[in-house]
C-alpha cells in the first residue's frame, strides 16, 4: 500500500503537470510536460493518463498533444462567476477588438496579481499577449497599477522596493513594465477603481515591445481607462478593495 507521503507526492506531481498550462500554454506533448516539471517521461505519462481519465486533460488524436480538459474548465466556471465574468467580459472583448490586443483583468491576492480573465482580439493575437496567471505585485504592470492606488498601509505590507515608481504610476495614471520571463514583452496596465477610488484590480495589455510602441501606448491608455472605469463602477463584493 502506498504511504501517505507517496500519495501526497502523486497529487503534487499532478498539480505540477496542470500548472504547465498556466498562462495560456496549450497542446503540450508528454515530453514537454516532463521537461517542464522535471519528471521522468514515464512518470509524466502515467500522470497525464490519470488526468485524461478524470477529464482534467484531453488528448488531440492527430498531434498526440494534450490540453486542458472539459472537467477542469467546468471547475473554473464557478470561480469566474464569483468575479462577475458575465458582467465585465463584454467590456474586455470590446476593448480587445478596438486596440487589437488581448485585454486582461487581474485582482490582488496576497503579494500577487491573479489574472481572472483574458479577452483575445478577433485579429492579430499572439501568445505574447497573454499575462502570467500569477504575477508579483511589486514588479508587474498590473500589480503596480493596483499598488499605486492602494492605501499607504497596503503598500507597506507589500514590501514595495521603490515608492517613487508608484508615485510615477499615480501621476500618469498607468503602469508599464517589461514581462519578467521575456524582456522583449512590455505590459501596460491601468487600475480598476471603485466609486470611492479604491483599487479593485487592474486592466492590462501586453505585447512585444516592437509592437507596443510609445505612440501606441499613448493611443490605447485612454480607452483602457474608460473600460476600467465601467468595470470599477459595477465592482461588487467579488472584487474586494485593496486596502
Image (cartoon, grey):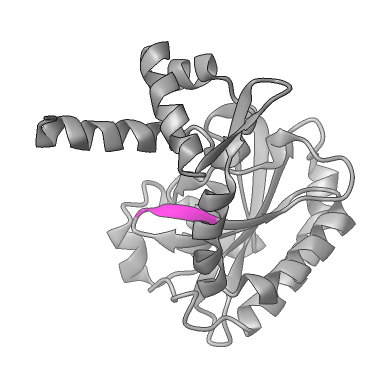
Residue 102 in the image: state x and y as whole percent.
Answer: 74, 49
Residues shaded magenta? 111-115
Q: Quadrant of the N terminus?
A: top left
User: Is the residue 115 above or below the residue 181 in the image?
Assistant: below
10 relative position to 98: left or right: left
User: Is the residue 84 above or below the residue 120 in the image?
Assistant: below
64 relative position to 79: left or right: right
Closest to the observer: 54 or 77?
A: 54
- The residue depicted at 77 percent of the width and 69 percent of the height is 90
Count the marks. Answer: 0
Closest to the observer: 153 or 132?
A: 132
Q: Quadrant of the C terminus?
A: bottom left
5 relative position to 237: left or right: left
Closest to the observer: 30 or 190?
A: 30
Residue 8: quadrant of the picture: top left
Closest to the observer: 74 or 221?
A: 74
Residue 23 in the image: state x and y as whole percent.
Answer: 57, 40
- The residue depicted at 39 percent of the width and 13 percent of the height is 42
Residue 56 in the image: state x and y as whole percent.
Answer: 50, 43
Residue 6: quadrant of the picture: top left
Residue at far bottom of view: 195
Residue 86 forms part of the magenta stretch: no
Instruction: Kindly tell me whether residue 60 is visible in this rendering.
Output: yes
- The secondary structure that dominates the magenta segment is strand
Instruction: Kindly tell me whether residue 228 is visible in this rendering.
Output: no
- The residue depicted at 62 percent of the width and 78 percent of the height is 232
Residue 127 in the image: state x and y as whole percent.
Answer: 71, 35
Amino acid at each position: 500500500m502506498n504511504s501517505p507521503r507517496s500519495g501526497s507526492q502523486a497529487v503534487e506531481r499532478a498539480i505540477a503537470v496542470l500548472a504547465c498550462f498556466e498562462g495560456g500554454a496549450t497542446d503540450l506533448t508528454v515530453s514537454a510536460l516532463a521537461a517542464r516539471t522535471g519528471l521522468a517521461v514515464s512518470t509524466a505519462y502515467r500522470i497525464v493518463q490519470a488526468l485524461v481519465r478524470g477529464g482534467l486533460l484531453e488528448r488531440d488524436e492527430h498531434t498526440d498533444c494534450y490540453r486542458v480538459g472539459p472537467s477542469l474548465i467546468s471547475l473554473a466556471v464557478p470561480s469566474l462567476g464569483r468575479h462577475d465574468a458575465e458582467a465585465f467580459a463584454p467590456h474586455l472583448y470590446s476593448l480587445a477588438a478596438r486596440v487589437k490586443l488581448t485585454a486582461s483583468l487581474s485582482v490582488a491576492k496576497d503579494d500577487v496579481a491573479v489574472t481572472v480573465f483574458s479577452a483575445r482580439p478577433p485579429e492579430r493575437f499572439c501568445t505574447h499577449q497573454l499575462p502570467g496567471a500569477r504575477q508579483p505585485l511589486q514588479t508587474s504592470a498590473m500589480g503596480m497599477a493596483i499598488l499605486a492606488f492602494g492605501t499607504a498601509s497596503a503598500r507597506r505590507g507589500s514590501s514595495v522596493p521603490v515608492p517613487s515608481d508608484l508615485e510615477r504610476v499615480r501621476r500618469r495614471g498607468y503602469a508599464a513594465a517589461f514581462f519578467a520571463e521575456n524582456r522583449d514583452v512590455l505590459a501596460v496596465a491601468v487600475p480598476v477603481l471603485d466609486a470611492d477610488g479604491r483599487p479593485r484590480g487592474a486592466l492590462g495589455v501586453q505585447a512585444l515591445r516592437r509592437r507596443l510602441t510609445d505612440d501606441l501606448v499613448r493611443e490605447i491608455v485612454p480607452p483602457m481607462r474608460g473600460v476600467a472605469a465601467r468595470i470599477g463602477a459595477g465592482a461588487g463584493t467579488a472584487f474586494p478593495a485593496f486596502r
